[in-house]
Image (spheres, rainbow, N blue to C red):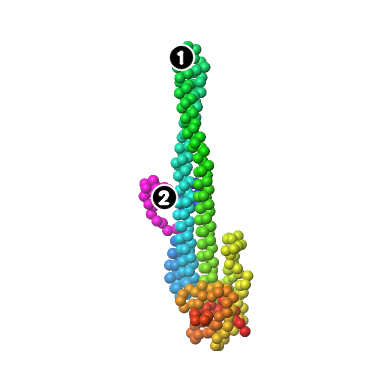
Amino acid sequence: MKQTEVLLQPNPNARIEEFVYEKLDRKAPSRINNPELLGQYMIDAGTEFGPGTAYGNALIKCGETQKRIGTADRELIQTSALNFLTPLRNFIEGDYKTIAKERKLLQNKRLDLDAAKTRLKKAKAAETRNSSEQELRITQSEFDRQAEITRLLLEGISSTHAHHLRCLNDFVEAQMTYYAQCYQYMLDLQKQLGSFPSNYLSNNNQTSVTPVPSVLPNAIGSSAMPSTSGLVITSPSNLSDLKECSGSRKARVLYDYDAANSTELSLLADEVITVFSVVGMDSDWLMGERGNQKGKVPITYLELLN
């Protein structure tokens, strides 16, 4: 129970504060968690650099993702505390103490019974013996009654185990939901950062490439993992052809892209769309058409079809 409290709230001072508020039957003040705090600092820094710059925009997107993770973390703490930690604490501080108290009382009744039996054995006079026999009957009756109470309490432990097993399943499910959310948030963030102009992704004047979303096979169930086997990095020559093309051309989408705003067009991997250049548009973007839908698309997500 204590270690679960540490997991959900690593800050010992915050745990003490929450304990005091709980004893006072008052609601603890809401505090910002570390991912939310980091997210806010990133957003503030990105705003200073300028949302129109690649680095400032990237900082803002990272900050927004960190705040989403902070929200998911807050939901994990609330759900786990309600469905797992609280029932466990109630048992340890309630039923368990009652059982321990009744067992200790049973032990005292057994000592009284043993003492009464010893006095009966030592009694010699008839009057003393009668008194000892009556005392033995009373202590035996009290012991039997206490033994029955303790037995019923201990037998109830089996149902308590079943209840805590359900609570444990709820705890595992809450963690599974939390880690799945975090994985999806970071996957979306990686895709957004990958859509930035390629010249901003270069490092120390090295040749830039479009980052391929990396997938950890053990991070989440294989059925929930997106496939990246068909992901192809656009070659520099293909980019040049796209930039220099005049009129409309067909292009195959390399992997999914979620539009950041209404001026962009969302893409699905392996679909074929029509693209064309627009005067004055950023050289790393083209206009894309799919039926009646039209919007900007990043060149690095496309493969020109001859």
Give the amino acid at mark 1.
Answer: Thr
Q: Nearer the viewer, residue 252 or 245?
A: 252
Q: Position of residue 200 (x, y in %)?
A: 53, 75
Q: Which residues are magenta?
A: 13-35
| On screen, residue 97 above or below 172 | above
- Residue 294 covered by magenta stretch: no
Q: Nearer the viewer, residue 27 or 149?
A: 149
Residue 137 visible in the snapshot: yes
- Residue 26 covered by magenta stretch: yes
Kindly identify which residue carries mark 1: 128
Q: Is residue 238 left or right of residue 265?
A: right
Q: Position of residue 104 (x, y in %)?
A: 48, 32
Q: Position of residue 194 (x, y in %)?
A: 54, 72
The reply to whether discs 2 and 1 touch (Cβ–Cβ < 8 Å) is: no
Residue at the far bottom: name it: 246
Q: CA distance from mark 2 to mark 1?
A: 61 Å
- Residue at point 51% right, 50% down? 166
Q: Nearer the viewer, residue 138 or 73?
A: 138
Kindly identify which residue carries mark 2: 18
| On screen, residue 281 above or below 112 | below
Dot 2 falls on a residue whose secondary structure is helix
Q: Earlier in the sequence, mark 2 or mark 1?
A: 2
